Each structure stands twice: as structure tokens, then as C-alpha cells.
Image (cartoon, rainbow, N blue to C red):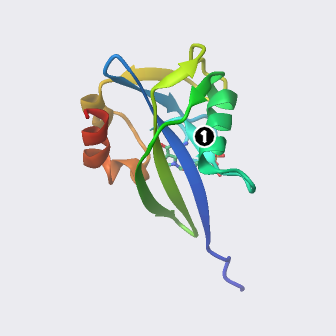
Amino acid sequence: MKARRKIWIPVVTALMRKDGLVLLGQRPKGSLQGQWEFPGGKIEMGETPEEALKRELQEELGVTATVGDLRLATTHTYGDRGVLILFYDVRFWKGEPKSQHHVDLMWVKPEEIHRQEIPEANRKILAQLTAILNS
Ligand code: DGT
């Protein structure tokens, strides 16, 4: 049997902060169901990472965001596919985030993220993420 070709998927996520808290969304039915992630998703062909994140935040939360600086990048492999995840600061947006994709949304203290079920890709780098979120 022919082996399935391994692929890399570029993903952008938002570190959305308000009053010392950061926004997490609970993943709906599908892969990593129920896990609490940073809002975001895959970069489509032809988009810049910033355009992709702005689109995802509009689609998922209904907000018009100003995408800030790239703060961290990591890779993680799930079986035969890998993700390259780029984490961006997002401090300004228009509208109130509403869950249009996630099962639920919550604002948490950076120190409390580790108590939640989160994607392994994020748990691996949680110390770095927490440091960024507290900076
Ligand atoms: P799927 O079902 O895994 O093909 O992807 P979707 O469409 O349900 O999920 P999407 O578009 O959010 O893809 C993001 C991929 O990156 C997905 O494999 C999960 C992974 N990932 C790991 N950590 C995070 C995170 O904090 N936020 C987001 N959005 N994705 C994450």
C-alpha cells in the first residue's frame, strides 16, 4: 500500500488579551473536539498570515481585529500531518467576541491555561506562551 504523503499545514492563532485575561475557544465536533484553543485556523492559499488571522477572527468570533506582532512559532506533528503554528498578538478589535464556531468561549488568566484540556501543540510551549501573555 502506498504511504500517504506527509504534509505541513500553516496555522495562525491569536493571543487576544483583555484586562490580563486571554481568550480561549472550545473546539467543536471534529479533530481535537472539546479542547480549548486560541482562536484561528489554517492559512488559505494566496493569503498572508495576517490576512488569514483577520479572516478567521471575523468568521469565528464576529470581530474585526487588528493583527499585531508575531510572538511565537512552533511545529507539531499529528500522525501523518504536521502543523506550523504562528501565534500573533491581538490587542485591538471591533465588536464583542461571540462564538460562531466554538462550542464556548472563555477569558482565562494565563496561569490557569494549564488546567484546561488544550492541544498538545500548545502544551509543549506553554511556559513560553505564559511568559508572552504576562509580558
Ligand atoms: P482539522 O479538523 O484538524 O482539519 O482542522 P479544523 O478546520 O477543525 O481546525 P483549524 O482550521 O482550526 O486548524 C488548525 C489546526 O491547528 C488543527 O489541526 C488544530 C491545530 N491547533 C493546535 N493548536 C491550536 C490553537 O491554539 N488554535 C487553533 N486554531 N488550532 C490549533
Q: Residue at point 66% right, 23% down?
A: 100
Q: Which one is in front, 28 or 22?
A: 22
Residue underneath mark 1: 53
Image quarter (top left, top right, bottom left or bottom right) of the N terminus: bottom right
Residue 110 image offset from top left, x and y in percent: 29, 31
Q: In this rendering, would 132 be left or right of 60?
A: left
**Quadrant (top left, top right, bottom left, bottom right) of the C terminus:** top left
Label 1 secondary element: helix
Q: Residue at x 63, y 35 (%)?
A: 54
Residue that protrudes farthest toward the top in the picture: 96
- The answer to whether residue 11 is left or right of residue 20 is right
Q: Amino acid at mark 1?
A: Leu
- The residue depicted at 54 percent of the width and 35 percent of the height is 67
Indicate the quadrant where residue 104 lies.
top right
Asked if residue 95 is positioned above or below residue 65 in the image, the reply reads above
The image quadrant of residue 117 is top left
